[in-house]
Image (cartoon, coloured by chain):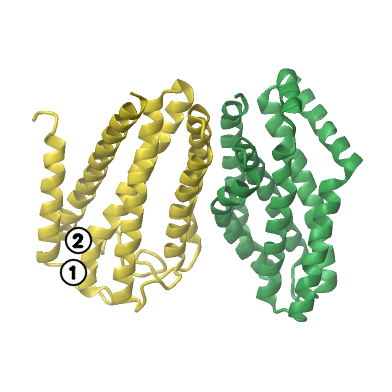
Amino acid sequence: MQLAQQVKHLIKKEIILEWRSKYALNGVLLYVVSTVFVCFMSFQVVEKITWNALFWIIMLFASINAIAKSFLQESRGRQLYIYTLVSPAALIIAKTIYNSLLMMLLTVIALAFYSLVFEPSKDIDILMYLLAAVLGSLSFATIFTMVSAIASKTGNGGMLMAILSFPIIIPVLIVLIKFAKNAIDGLDRSVSLDEIGLLAVINVIVMTVALLLFPYLWRD
Amino acid sequence: MQKSWWKILAAVLVVYTAITGLLLEVPRLAILNETIRNLYFHVPMWFAMVVLFTISVWYSVRSLSTQSEADDVRAVESANTGIIFGILGIVTGAVWAKFTWGQFWSFDPKQNFAAISLLLYFAYFVLRNAIDEEQKRSKIAAIYNIFAFPMMIVLLFVLPRLQDSLHPGNGGNPGFNSYDLDSRMRMVFYPACLGWILIGYWVYTLRFRTKTLENKQNTL
């Protein structure tokens, strides 16, 4: 009960902080919009496969930028303050939930803008592609939150964030791209069940491991 | 002498498999032909690697609770040895692929995933080098090691089953299963696995001991 209360308050704190500065949201939106424009100017027209790959590459870098700051940005003093108030489990759960929400919002906006600039193929299964986007943002959030927590402990976090997270995210990205490609080709929905299941399993594993490990990581 | 029986066993087994693996009769299968003998040398590398990485994770878990330096050194050195076996696995696979698929590296899913799983462990060593403080380094590296291990399992054992690969055992290609592997091959294959796992463990204990001596000398 207490945990739920703490998580609620921490998420509220994150949202208020973000709402005041709108730093992550605006920054990443600007990043997505400008990347899509650059891609538009260099590609003009894209094929189905490129359309999919380009979208996930843009989302990958956008999400690393958005989530890396979740731990890197916190000052030492504030971390110490939070440490005295709440349990570590509450903190990692709150950060992951907040990052998932942020990523879902970003992904939906990015997808809308992306398909405005590059027309998606005609037989795309919109609902399935949205599901892929949502599952993708969820996986990015769970994995990058933990990696960002690890990288923030090392001093030069920004550089390590990429090195540490890419090998972990590649398997997820491969499954995601395959799933999204099924959606673009408008294949029958039952074809993608394997991928959905695997993504769900990976997310559950990552969340459990993160919950178990974070208490050790947190205290210095 | 009594304690080193398993080292003698390891040496005997590996020499036995090297000789019998090259001389004994093997079944004639399409495409594979004589290259099926690579089973005795390529597959045990991966078994040894997985065993060594499992040891590494086990000591990482222990070092989180005991905070002892010895556990940390054990985790690092077994990961180090595991990487050597992983590279050997990739090289033996690539040489085999040259003669059956025509190219050393043809971006087969199995090859790619094996390479990415090694990247995970390279990232582990980059992370270690990025932190100077020893206590902190052992803790954070242990956390990353535990976090990365499930991903390696997914990469090596789950994802290749979802993709079309030319690798024996996938997509109807003859390979490592009950009716292809006749009893003569089992006579060589199982000893080879056991022998190489023992050799890997031996290398790891040697590395651990030299590293401990080095550390002791440095602190004096």
Identify which residue, A192 or A32, lies in the foreground. Answer: A32
Residue drawn at x 26%, y 64% is: B180
Amino acid type, residue under disc 1 in the picture: Pro
Question: Which chain, by letter, is yellow?
Answer: B
Residue drawn at x 79%, y 29% is: A10
Provide the secondary structure element on which disc 2 rests: loop
Residue drawn at x 16%, y 44% is: B10
Chain A color in figure = green
Q: Which mark is residue B27?
A: 1
> Residue B47: where, in percent of width, then height?
31, 49
Identify which residue, B88 or B171, lies in the foreground. Answer: B88
> Residue B88: where, in percent of width, then height?
31, 57
Q: Quadrant of the N terminus of chain A?
A: top right
Q: Could you say which quadrant of the image residue A171 lies in?
A: bottom right
Q: Could you say which quadrant of the image residue A97 lies in?
A: top right
**Are the residues at dot 2 and dot 1 in contact (C-beta closer than 8 Å)?**
yes
**Is residue B216 found left or right of B41 in the rendered image?**
right
> Residue A40: where, in percent of width, then height?
79, 75
Amino acid type, residue under disc 2 in the picture: Asp
Against A102, residue B183 (above or below) is below
Against B42, residue B6 (above or below) is above
Residue behind mark 2: B182
Cα distance between the residues tagged 2 and 1: 8 Å
Q: Residues within 10 Å of mark 2 (few under 14, many from 20)?
A: few
Total number of numbered discs in the rendering: 2
> Could one spot residue A51 in this view of the protein?
yes
> Could one spot residue A96 in this view of the protein?
no
Among all residues in the image, which is located at the extreme right?
A20
Tell me, yes or no, whether dots 2 and 1 are on the same chain.
yes
**Is residue A178 found left or right of B153 in the rendered image?**
right
Of mark 2 and mark 1, the one earlier in the sequence is 1
